[in-house]
Image (cartoon, rainbow, N blue to C red):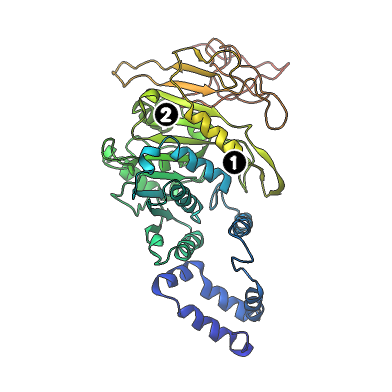
């Protein structure tokens, strides 16, 4: 192509037309033909082709790790250029590895079975990073496992990146067949499918009004659809994605299913009693699907520094976890990056990942209302019991927390000692200037406060007294 500069446009078009039908779909979603036309009209096509021809990206020159770092940087710049919502397109590899390790933790009897068929799904697969890392990790644990990948992505360009990556990684290209394009909320492309492992990082605070008509129509079907527990406010669809994933799990007793999803703090606290968010949380807790919530450090993602959590759910809890939810505060388990990438200034190192997973594995059922572990333990657990309701709900859920009360934080500071339980308040340590640990469901009320959520009492400032009913 470079030997005939005058025919560079015709040769480039012929090159694109020479791909197979499935790859031509990827090219169309990349919008490469229009890009080639634009470069040709601007007189830049030859220079761009020449630059790519001179770049030596052979694996002997650029290792897989280096190529992954290059890929992360390109995706980050693409996010900034398109001003996308936080968390879209790409989740850093250190966070994905932690999610996968938490999914597989204590799951050896299932995943290590010879020739085990494992189906992995990401409803917001983006460029496919979660799927490929999950596949790689499962094959490390069990080289004989047959791992099938499934996903859905609404953005054409990132869908094309995911498809093309899987085409290159599989000999026959079949691994890419499970990746579909379209809106997961309004146009589920995997109806009737069930998956063993599901993991996702849905966009935070993304408006779902475009899908509202079809989502609400499906919600009216009750539990015959995906959204029978309710719908959250239209400004944030994270709990819709979680319901969608739970709808694609195997039924208890039919097969094994586990879910890991990254969300910000909104799904934990948003919504008054009886609201859509509150009813979704009630639905999950009363059915005892929520196994653990891991609070992550801030500044882990490329285009947002907000704090996030990993929710771990399963269709069948082990006996020692039934009726309980484990809360792990890993917000200080991080190491600084040598060089920041956008808003990402911290990494979850392999040692920190192992430490978090070990905390998860070491969990034992604590005594009701007490603290497990004696003096000298680094990670005492606190627990409380939620009362049963009058309708004869399943056994009450106990919320348990690992609090690093005696261990120095990564930055050198020490976390405060666990504070006392204030009347009308909650048990648990408070970070200086922070809002305290996350809890599943409900609002936070301060003792003696006015009941409004998240309003701190400022020194020397009086609040107007609230009228008494």
189 and 21: which is toward the camera: 21
CA gap between label 1 and label 2 equals 36 Å
Label 2, secondary structure: give it. helix
206 and 460: which is toward the camera: 206
Which quadrant of the view contains residue 393? Answer: top left
Counting the numbered discs, the total is: 2
- Say which of marks 1 and 2 sits in front: 1
The residue pinned by badge 1 equals: 350
Where does residue 135 sit, x and y in percent of width and height?
Answer: 45, 51
Is 249 displayed left or right of 138 in the figure? left
What's the residue at 60%, 53% (across, down)? 83
Where does residue 266 sit, x and y in percent of width and height?
Answer: 52, 34
Tag of residue 278 = 2
Can you say whether 168 is above or below 387 in the image? Answer: below
461 and 231: which is toward the camera: 231
Is 185 displayed left or right of 207 in the figure? left
116 and 213: which is toward the camera: 116
Is 145 displayed left or right of 97 in the figure? left
Is residue 337 in view? yes
Where does residue 164 sit, x and y in percent of width and height?
Answer: 48, 65
Label 1 neighbourhood size at 10 Å, few (<14), some (14-19), many (20+)?
few
Which quadrant of the view contains residue 466? Answer: top right
Classify the position of the N terminus by image quarter.
bottom right
What's the residue at 64%, 37% (across, down)? 334
Which quadrant of the view contains residue 394? Answer: top left
Tag of residue 247 = none
Label 1, secondary structure: give it. helix
Can you say whether 40 is above or below 192 in the image? Answer: below
Q: Earlier in the sequence, mark 1 or mark 2?
A: 2
What's the residue at 52%, 23% (across, down)? 401
Can you say whether 25 is above or below 142 in the image? Answer: below
């Amino acid at each position: 192509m470079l030997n005939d500069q005058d025919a560079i446009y015709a040769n480039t078009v012929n090159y694109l037309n020479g791909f197979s039908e499935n790859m031509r779909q990827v090219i169309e979603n990349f919008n490469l033909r229009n890009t080639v036309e634009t470069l040709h009209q601007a007189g830049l096509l030859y220079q761009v082709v020449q630059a790519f021809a001179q770049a030596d990206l052979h694996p002997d020159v650029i290792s897989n790790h280096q190529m992954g770092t290059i890929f992360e940087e390109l995706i980050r710049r693409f996010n900034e250029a398109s001003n996308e919502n936080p968390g879209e397109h790409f989740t850093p590899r250190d966070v994905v590895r932690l999610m996968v390790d938490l999914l597989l933790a204590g799951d050896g009897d299932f995943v290590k079975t010879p020739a085990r068929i494992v189906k992995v799904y990401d409803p917001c697969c983006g460029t496919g990073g979660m799927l490929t890392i999950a596949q790689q990790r499962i094959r490390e644990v069990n080289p004989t496992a047959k791992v099938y990948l499934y996903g859905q992505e609404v953005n054409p360009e990132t869908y094309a990146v995911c498809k093309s990556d899987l085409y290159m990684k599989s000999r026959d290209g079949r691994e890419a067949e499970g990746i579909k394009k379209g809106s997961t909320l309004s146009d589920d492309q995997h109806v009737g499918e069930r998956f063993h492992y599901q993991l996702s990082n849905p966009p935070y605070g993304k408006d779902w009004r475009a899908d509202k008509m079809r989502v609400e129509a499906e919600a009216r079907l009750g539990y015959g659809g995906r959204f029978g527990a309710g719908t959250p406010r239209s400004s944030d669809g994270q709990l819709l994605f979680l319901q969608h994933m739970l709808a694609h799990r195997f039924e208890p007793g039919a097969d094994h299913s586990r879910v890991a999803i990254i969300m910000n703090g909104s799904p934990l606290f948003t919504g008054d009693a009886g609201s859509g968010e509150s009813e979704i949380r009630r639905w999950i807790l009363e059915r005892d699907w929520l196994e653990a919530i891991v609070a992550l450090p801030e500044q882990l993602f490329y285009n947002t520094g907000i704090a996030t959590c990993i929710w771990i759910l399963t269709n069948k809890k082990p006996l020692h976890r039934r009726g309980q939810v484990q809360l792990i505060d890993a917000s200080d388990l991080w190491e600084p990056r040598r060089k920041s990438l956008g808003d990402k200034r911290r990494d979850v190192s392999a040692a920190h990942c192992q430490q978090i997973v070990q905390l998860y594995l070491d969990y034992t059922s604590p005594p009701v209302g007490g603290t497990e572990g004696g003096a000298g333990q680094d990670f005492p657990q606190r627990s409380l019991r939620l009362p049963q309701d009058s309708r004869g709900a399943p056994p009450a859920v106990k919320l348990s927390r690992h609090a690093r009360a005696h261990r120095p934080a990564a930055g050198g500071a020490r976390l405060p000692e666990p504070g006392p339980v204030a009347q009308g308040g909650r048990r648990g340590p408070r970070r200086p200037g922070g809002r305290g640990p996350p809890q599943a469901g409900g609002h936070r009320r301060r003792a003696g406060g006015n009941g409004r959520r998240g309003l701190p009492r400022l020194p020397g400032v009086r609040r107007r007294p609230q009228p008494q009913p």
